[in-house]
Image (cartoon, rainbow, N blue to C red):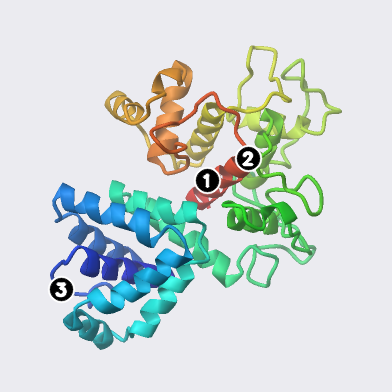
Amino acid sequence: MRRNFLILFLIISLMVFNLPSVTRASASIDETLIEVFFNQFNKLDADTRDIALDLLRTVYFVDEEGLEQFKDDINSLLPEEYKDELRDKGISMSDVYDMIDELKSWSKDDRMKLISYVEDGDEKAVIRLLEKYEMLSSGEGTGGSSGGAASPSGQTSTPAATPAVSTPAVQVGFKDMENHWAKDVVSFLTGMGIVKGKSQDKFDPDGYITRAEFTALLVRMMGLENTSANGNIFDDVKPEDWFYSAVYAAYQKGLVKGITEHSFEPNKNITREEMAVLIARAAASMNKAIQVDSVEIENIMSQYKDSGRIHDWAQTGVASAIKSGLMLGQGNGIFNPEGKATRAESATVIYNLYQTIK
């Protein structure tokens, strides 16, 4: 499926950007196909790219009606020579329409992300996003036979610091996620046993998440829960607390630090900048972090109108998380560093990290 979407984006480039024919014979693997697309895309002048991407954002990728219009426009605007070329490669217009229909299963947010990643030239982020829907469409991680790597008992046994989760016997469906933009991510992570609902049928996607809850998600995804906890680290994290072993494991791994030397404030809602720092540390602990220097940090910060609100201690982590594609702003040049992270946002970040370090 990933290859299909990359072919579709090449078709978009042919139709919208009026590019010369590209040779697909060498594009037999996904990464090569991505490279072919980006090479062609980068040949365009900036104004043409902006106009084309704006068309995708505001017309074709907005909703199902826009995608249907996309199908009509492809049929009428794609030159016959390109259609013949596609047919020579075994791709019919019916196949193209099926690819567009697949985009209807994507959340609008992810369709917009795909365009943004192309705009930024972020090939790795494109691959991660396409892999997400590739796995969801195949049933991987949703409690089916292809999901997870569980032992006969249903539990995954993996060394510490390796992403490890258990696959539940029953997939939980959350009624409050049916039309939510994070539906697919939450469904995937629930099937993998990484996230849990407030109840059997309620996830509460727009509710806030505490520092302890997010730490538990991180530890669960990384397979650190079996770390032997012994001793007090923070005055407000007691052995009898449900989050004790998670916070202990995260602290031992160097993922979390206290608000003060002796206080963790586990029940305080985690902020977006705190979440960014934690996932950047987690990626670094798995040797998957993307390093940023002072110039890159300054450039990344300059993209956000509210970058002045990002604390000094968080800037490297936030910049690394953004550059890695682990976390994005909230649109309109806003990062909202001190804003409270929602459960849907945290699930998306955990999913992005899972894809990066798996």
Q: Is mark 3 in CB contact (under 8 Å) with mark 2?
A: no
- Name the amino acid, label 3: Ser
Q: Which residue is mark 1?
A: 353
Q: Which residue is mark 3?
A: 21
Q: Please provide percent x and percent y for residue 354.
A: 55, 49
Residue at the farthest right position: 240
Q: Which residue is mark 2?
A: 218
Disc 3 on helix, strand or loop? Answer: loop
Question: Is 293 on the left-hand or right-hand side of 202?
Answer: left
- Name the amino acid, label 2: Leu
Q: Please provide percent x and percent y for residue 353.
A: 52, 45
Q: Please provide percent x and percent y for residue 45.
A: 13, 51
Q: Residue at x 65, y 40 (%)?
A: 206
Residue 134 vs 187, above or below: the answer is below
Q: Which of the two labelled residues, at mark 3 and mark 2, occupies the earlier sequence position?
A: 3
Q: CA distance from mark 3 to mark 2?
A: 46 Å
Question: Is 213 on the left-hand or right-hand side of 284?
Answer: right
- Name the amino acid, label 1: Leu
Q: Which is nearer the eye, 68 or 181?
A: 68
Specify few, some or many for label 3: CA neighbours under 10 Å numbering under 14, 14-19, or 20 or more: few
Q: Please provide percent x and percent y for residue 322.
A: 41, 37
Q: Residue at x 23, y 49 (%)?
A: 50
Residue 305 vs 224, above or below: the answer is above
Q: Which of the two labelled residues, at mark 2 and mark 1, occupies the earlier sequence position?
A: 2
Q: Residue at x 50, y 26 (%)?
A: 337
